[in-house]
Amino acid sequence: MSTKHTLRVGVSSARELELEIDDPVAVSAAYEKALKGKDSISWITDTREHRLGIAIDSIAFIQIEPPIDRGVGFGN
């Protein structure tokens, strides 16, 4: 069973970035802090330990999806 969340970030260029993240609460908190003017860049670390810095002015939205339980076999 996967515990990885999927984070989708819409940027002003009409594209989206999609990352697998382990801690959606930390990502939400970092985004909210940046929106309040304390940071100009929101830093996100994905499940493979890659860090991505996104300029807060270029983010149109964020969407955090819960993990998908992918069953095994044909009965699901």
Image (cartoon, rainbow, N blue to C red):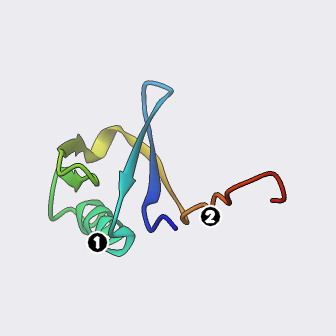
Residue 8 placement (x, y as % from top left) = 47, 47
Under tag 2, what secondary structure?
loop
Judge whether 63 appears above or below 25 on screen: above
Task: Name the mark nearer the viewer: 2 or 1.
Answer: 2
Question: Along the line of sight, which residue is nearer the eye, 28 or 49?
Answer: 49
Judge whether 52 appears above or below 23 on screen: above
Residue 26 image-quadrant placement: bottom left
Q: Which labelled disc corresponds to residue 49?
A: none
Please report the residue visible at 43 percent of the width from the left and 31 percent of the height from the top. Answer: 12
Residue 24 placement (x, y as % from top left) = 38, 68
Direction from residue 32 to residue 52 in the image, left or right: left
3D distance between C-alphas at marks 2 and 1? 22 Å
Residue 69 placement (x, y as % from top left) = 62, 64
Please report the residue visible at 31 percent of the width from the left and 64 percent of the height from the top. Answer: 27
Residue at numbered disc 1:
26
Amino acid, disc 1: Ala
Tell me the crowding category of disc 1: few under 14, some 14 to 19, or many 20 or more residues within 10 angstroms, Cα based. Answer: few
N-terminal-most mark, 2 or 1: 1
Query: Which residue is most to the front?
Result: 73
Question: Along the line of sight, which residue is nearer the eye, 45 or 42?
Answer: 45
Number of dots carrying numbers: 2
Please report the residue visible at 15 percent of the width from the left and 58 percent of the height from the top. Answer: 39
| CB under 8 Å between discs 2 and 1 | no
Judge whether 40 appears above or below 36 on screen: above
Residue at numbered disc 2:
69
Judge whether 53 appears above or below 12 on screen: below
Direction from residue 18 to residue 57 in the image, left or right: left
Amino acid, disc 2: Asp
Q: Which quarter of the rendering shows the C terminus?
A: bottom right
Under tag 1, what secondary structure?
helix
Question: Along the line of sight, which residue is nearer the eye, 50 or 73?
Answer: 73
Please report the residue visible at 31 percent of the width from the left and 62 percent of the height from the top. Answer: 31
